[in-house]
């Protein structure tokens, strides 16, 4: 019975199968190799900060990161930093400034130096961006030495970065960290203006910063690393007070657990504000330490974290001690986005200067 109608079916099918296949959409050449990532920190804050009571919804930060691969050697990157102007003529305005604007050049491998590259322009500095790959709570606030104004996270200049040896296995990189996954560690060294990405250059000095990270037991404890980072230069004012610091850090990363401990000592700071007075412009000696822990308490998606910072500044009139306690819980929406509830208490230990205490609920969106 079916065979009787087979010729008619075939005749009807011919036009369908003879239709031309639509061409695959071609990406315009100017968009080839282009990636765009976005990161926003949207918060509600309640408490006291710098002697001002806060009860407000806030935009803490917004980043738009645009990368363009030129070829296997060169690529470019521009990152906008969106924030609210807290002072000046534009108080209250949402402002956009640049955080990074750089040319990246991949370098050939030399012995056990793998995945080496250089950046030129508004660049990543050796430590802060690396630390943020360990401590994933930039959404709460800046890292230890940036928050104490010892150093900045980006600057104008050039930087060389590399990892030691081949990369750790894919399972570790997927579950724990893919940031500089060299089996034996990594390093970075930079030469910059020294005033940070949001300041003009007020002297002719250049600053050298470096980081050395070693992974002593990559087979038994791949997440254990020992770090040294430091800088030498001048504070970014015309009087150019001395600035240097040395810091040692011990970090451990595992699936569901991150612990770090760091200590530093030095004199002055990158901005030139850590001085004894505005007559001698002598730099102030400083030292301090910080501990941080992040623990997954429910899989998937709920972590508790805490941090303690302590800094002593040795003024001629007497030492000044500042302490900060941070504690909170993070609810992961995805592996890249989360809701954070935290409390930040800052003790100035100074008569006549009130302490800060701020509660916030903040959403970090990464797209």
Image (tube, helix red, strand yellow):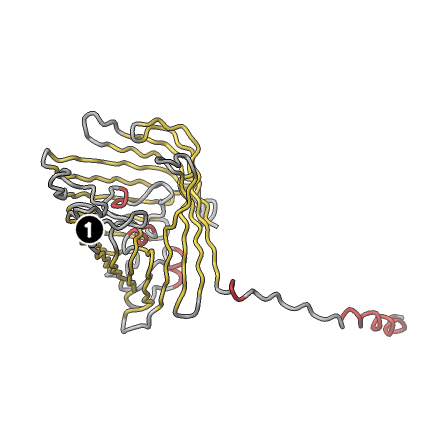
Query: Quick one: 85 or 203, which is closer to the camera?
Result: 203
Residue designated by label 1: 247
Total marks placed = 1
Q: Is residue 285 left or right of residue 220?
A: left
Q: Is residue 337 above or below residue 2?
A: above
Query: Quick one: 348 or 306, which is closer to the camera?
Result: 348
Query: Quick one: 361 or 153, which is closer to the camera?
Result: 153
Q: Could you say where residue 187 lies in the image, as x and y percent from the top left? A: 26, 61
Residue that protrudes farthest toward the top in the picture: 352
Q: Is residue 26 left or right of residue 314?
A: right
Q: Is residue 274 above or below residue 126?
A: above
**Quadrant of the snapshot with the N terminus:** bottom right
Q: Could you say where residue 87 lies in the image, as x and y percent from the top left? A: 35, 35
Q: Is residue 297 left or right of residue 145?
A: right
> What residue is shown at x 44% (from left), y 50% (from top)?
64
> What residue is shown at x 34% (from left), y 41% (from top)?
141
Q: Could you say where residue 24 lies in the image, as x and y percent from the top left? A: 62, 67
**Residues packed near mark 1 inside 10 Å, few (<14), some (14 to 19) or many (20 plus):** some
Q: Secondary structure at mark 1?
A: strand
Residue 47 picture quarter: top left
Q: Is residue 175 left or right of residue 162?
A: right
Q: Could you say where residue 44 lies in the image, as x and y percent from the top left? A: 42, 33
Residue that protrudes farthest toward the left in the picture: 316
Query: Quick one: 196 or 204, which is closer to the camera?
Result: 204
> What residue is shown at x 14% (from left), y 42% (from top)?
281
């Amino acid at each position: 019975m079916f065979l009787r109608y087979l010729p008619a079916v075939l005749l009807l099918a011919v036009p369908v199968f003879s239709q031309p296949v639509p061409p695959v959409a071609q990406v315009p050449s100017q968009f080839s190799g282009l990636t765009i990532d976005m990161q926003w920190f949207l918060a509600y804050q309640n408490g006291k900060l710098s002697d001002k009571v806060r009860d407000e919804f806030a935009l803490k930060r917004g980043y738009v990161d645009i990368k363009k691969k030129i070829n296997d050697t060169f690529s470019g990157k521009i990152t906008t930093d969106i924030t609210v102007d807290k002072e000046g003529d534009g108080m209250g305005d949402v402002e956009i400034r640049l955080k990074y604007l750089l040319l990246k050049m991949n370098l050939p491998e030399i012995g056990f130096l793998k995945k080496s590259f250089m950046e030129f322009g508004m660049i990543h500095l050796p430590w802060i961006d690396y630390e943020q790959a360990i401590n994933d709570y930039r959404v709460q606030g800046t890292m230890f030495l940036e928050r104490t104004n010892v150093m900045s996270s980006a600057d104008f200049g050039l930087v060389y970065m590399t990892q030691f040896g081949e990369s750790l296995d894919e399972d570790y990189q997927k579950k724990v960290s893919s940031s500089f996954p060299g089996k034996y560690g990594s390093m970075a060294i930079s030469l910059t203006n020294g005033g940070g990405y949001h300041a003009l250059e007020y002297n002719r000095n250049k600053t050298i910063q470096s980081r050395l990270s070693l992974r002593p037991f990559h087979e038994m404890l791949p997440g254990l690393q020992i770090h040294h980072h430091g800088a030498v230069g001048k504070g970014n004012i015309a009087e150019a007070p001395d600035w240097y610091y040395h810091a040692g850090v011990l970090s451990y990363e595992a699936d569901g657990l991150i612990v770090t401990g760091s200590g530093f000592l030095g004199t002055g700071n990158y901005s030139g504000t850590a001085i004894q007075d505005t007559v001698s412009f002598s730099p102030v000696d400083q030292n301090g330490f910080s501990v941080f822990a992040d623990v997954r308490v429910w899989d998937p998606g709920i972590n508790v974290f805490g941090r303690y910072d302590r800094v002593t500044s040795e003024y001629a009139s007497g030492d000044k001690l500042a302490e900060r306690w941070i504690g909170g819980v993070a609810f992961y929406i995805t592996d890249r986005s989360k809701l954070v509830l935290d409390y930040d208490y800052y003790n100035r230990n100074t008569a006549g200067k009130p302490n800060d205490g701020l509660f916030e609920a903040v959403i970090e969106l990464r797209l």
